[in-house]
Amino acid sequence: MDTIHLRPKVLLLRMGKVPFMDTTGESNLSSLVKHFEKFGGIILVSGIQAQPLDVLKRTGLYTLIGAEHFFGHTGEALNFALLQLDLNKCLGCKHFAFRECAALSNKESQKEVITSLKADPART
C-alpha cells in the first residue's frame, strides 16, 4: 500500500478459500494488519475456515483484529464496510463496484440504502 500511496479505510480479506495457515502466513498477515491499523484502517475478515481461525486465536491476531470484524459471509462484511465509509465521496461516482454503489452515488437514494443496511446488517 505504501508503494501505490493508497490509504483505504477498510480492507476486506476474503478467507473462504484459505484452508490452512502456517506460522509464516500468520506472521505476514500480522504485519499487514498492524501496518494497516497504524494508519487508521479497519480490517474485516469473511468466510474464514476453522484451521486459520484457530491460528489467529492462538497467536492473538484474532483479538487484535477484533471479533466484531469477522463475518461468516462476504456480503455481511461489505454491508459493515459500507457503513464505515464517508458517503460524501460516493456522491457522483460512476464506478459502481458493488450493487449498492449506484444508489450511493445519488443523495436521495443514499439515505434509503443506509437505512436498509442499518436495519438488516446481515443482508447479503
Image (spheres, rainbow, N blue to C red):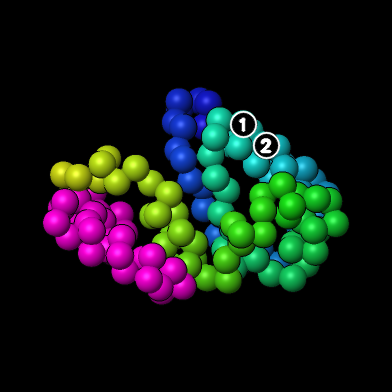
Compared with 102, 35 (above or below) is above
Compared with 57, 10 (above or below) is above
- Count of marks, rendered view: 2
Please name the amino acid that badge 2 sits on.
Lys
Q: Tag 1, which secondary structure?
A: helix
Q: Residues within 10 Å of mark 1 (few under 14, many from 20)?
A: few
In magenta segment, residue 98: yes
Residue 43 percent across, percent down from the top left: 57, 48
Residue 112 percent across, percent down from the top left: 23, 64
| Position of residue 107 in the picture relative to residue 71 (left or right) | left
What residue do we see at 57% from left, 66% from top?
A: 71
Q: Residue 34, labelled with which disc?
A: 2
Residue 17 percent across, percent down from the top left: 61, 66
In magenta segment, residue 40: no
| Position of residue 25 in the picture relative to residue 1 (left or right) | right
What residue do we see at 80% from left, 64% from top?
A: 54
Let me know if residue 27 appears in the view: yes
Q: Quadrant of residue 116?
A: bottom left
What residue do we see at 83% from left, 51% from top?
A: 59
Q: Residue 82, labelled with which disc?
A: none
| Position of residue 101 in the picture relative to residue 1 (left or right) | left
Q: Are marks 2 and 1 in contact (CB under 8 Å)?
A: yes
Residue 106 percent across, percent down from the top left: 15, 53
Let me know if residue 124 appears in the view: no
Q: Quadrant of residue 5?
A: top left
Circle 1 residue:
38
Q: Tag 2, which secondary structure?
A: helix
Q: Residues within 10 Å of mark 2 (few under 14, many from 20)?
A: some
Distance from disc 2 to disc 1, alpha carbons, whole Å, reads 6 Å
Magenta-tinted stretch? 95-124
Please name the amino acid that badge 1 sits on.
Lys
Point out the image quarter for the C terminus.
bottom left
